Amino acid sequence: MKFNRRILLGLCLAAPVLVMAQGNSATAVNLKSDKPALVAGKDVAVVQTSFGKLRGYVHNGIFTYKGIPYAKAERFMPPTKPAEWTNVRTAFSYGPVCPTDVTTQVNDEIEFPFNHNWGFSNENCQVLNVWSAGINDSKKRPVMVWLHGGGFTAGSSIELPSYDGEALAKKGDVVVVSINHRLNILGHLDLSAFGDKYKASANVGMLDALAALHWVKDNIAQFGGDPNNVTIFGQSGGGGKVTTLMSAPAAKGYFHKAIVQSGSYLMNGIPTKEMTQKVGAALLEELGLQPAQVDSLKNVPYEKLLAAGKKAQQKVNAALRAEGRTANLGWGPVQDGDFLPYQPSSAEALQLSADVPMLVGTTKNEFTAFAPSGGDLTMDAIKENLKKRYADKADAYMMAVKKAYPNTTQPFQYTDIDFAFRPGAVKHGNSKAALGKAPVYMYLFNWQSPVNDGRYKAMHCMELPFVFNNIQRCEEMTGGGKEAYTLADQMSGAWINFARTGNPNYKGLPKWPAYTEAGGATMLFDVKNEVRSHPDKELLDIVTAKPM
């Protein structure tokens, strides 16, 4: 190998002197005594795990580890422990993400605020990442385990810049963990009808998440974390994963607090094994395989498998509709009678996590921000549209909007409010608070992004840069103004305090009482934060056709 002599000479003349203190602190000095932002080297950030030694790096004082294997698995099989290693393994780069539909084009304006990182894919995607302010120091920091969005079909721990855990770990002296796991057909194809070997196949994606929590239990102390103070938190599909784990008997005791961001939709129910087994059977037919050939599925190329799975779902959904039954089968958790014996909204499931404090909420606009804005519609046109939808309740609807959102001035602001996620969050909060065994805290994120003429509003995912204190990384989404930084300090502080104590109250926020169905205390995050009692109850009652 040839070296560039000029570069080599420059490195020698710079002569940096790096000193790594053993344990929980990192110091870096050179001849000018300035400190580099990043330190990496042979003896830097080394920790012992159950499977071997890991070496990470230190960035801005935060010990960082990426792509750590927490499990391994054959296709459709439950995860098992990863292979051990003897040498010190580096953990510098993000690991593989689960294969998903290939992205071939994007909507430019919608992609702009998200700034996705698609990563590289491999079915062996059971890896996690860790950020901590200290290692090997016996300090019991709260642990925050992030479950990414993308439904149960897409996404990864590196998909959005907001997911980076450095700023959160630095601000709150918490340990942040994020994970990749199996998704879509790889995580949720139900083959249980074809033998006991496949009895867990419908939920192996969530079994991966549970395996990650096992890894946290066994190893996080070396990373400065407290295995007895673990918060699971997630948004959208990640919130659904939190909801799933709260309903899983096998997950009990592996987490102690839960944050569900725009992810309470599973409270409306998950498919039963009787339904999802039909998809497995239809898949075999689609591929021209007999039940006795089910084992050959492990060798079918992913793209062919996924395409056949989609056709199988379409056929089963069509058959269910013909029977007059609900037909919206997709990839996701299944009530399999084993890992998930109950529906998430059932009394049995709720009791499993009755003693786990929960923080739950949504954003004002969610996916309505992606629809045509209706900015050119007049108030008369809006009223006409509302009459078609709500008939004699149209005027009451408009008054309820103004009551819930007093700053409503533009015609389109009467119709861009989310009603897909918000009712589920309220239902979730009511059900859990009724148990009376652990507090529930409710929020509604109303802050409107100024970017691109305000097109993105309080859209789905908008709260993420604020929760992770990552405004600088997410200026395309937030604009990076003073308002955003102030709110990010308050929200990230609230999430950190909740992870630490089960109470999100934080300096700069109004007093945030626990939520009950009777009291309805809801924190409204905006330019000016406020707590209101059932701020949108009249509006939700109209939309969900309940009596006012």
Image (spheres, rainbow, N blue to C red):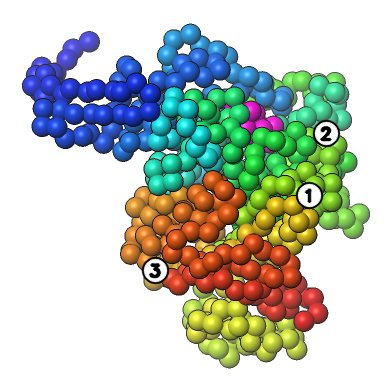
Q: Circle 3 — which element?
A: loop
Q: Residue at x 54, y 66 (%)?
A: 511
| Mark 2 to mark 1 CA distance (whole Å) | 16 Å
Find the distance from the CA under tag 1 to the CA under tag 3: 39 Å
Residue at horizontal 80%, vertical 47%?
351
Classify mark 2: residues with Cα within 10 Å, few (<14), some (14-19) or many (20+).
Answer: some
Q: Which residues are magenta?
A: 205-215
375 or 334, which is in the foreground? 334
Three-letter amino acid code at the position of disc 1: Leu
Instruction: Answer above or below: position of 198 versus 262.
Output: above
Residue designated by label 2: 338
Residue 376 placement (x, y as % from top left): 49, 81
Q: Nearer the viewer, mark 1 or mark 3?
A: 1
What type is the residue that disc 3 sits on? Pro
Q: Position of residue 341 (x, y in %)?
A: 84, 39
Q: Amino acid at mark 2?
A: Asp
- Where, by quadrant of the figure, is residue 286 drawn? top right
Disc 3 crowd, CA 10 A, few/some/many (<14, 14-19, 20+) = some
Judged by depth in the image, the label closer to the viewer, 3 or 2, is 2
Residue at the (69%, 70%) spot, across then down: 519
Q: Position of residue 177 (x, y in %)?
A: 51, 36
Residue at position x 10%, y 32% in the image: 32
Using the image, tell me which numbered label, if any, was put on residue 37. Answer: none
Query: According to the image, label 3 marks what residue?
Result: 450
* Secondary structure of the residue carrying numbered label 2: loop
Considering the numbered disc 1 on the image, is that residue within a helix, a strand or a loop?
A: helix
Q: Earlier in the sequence, mark 2 or mark 1?
A: 2
User: Is residue 457 in the magenta section?
Assistant: no
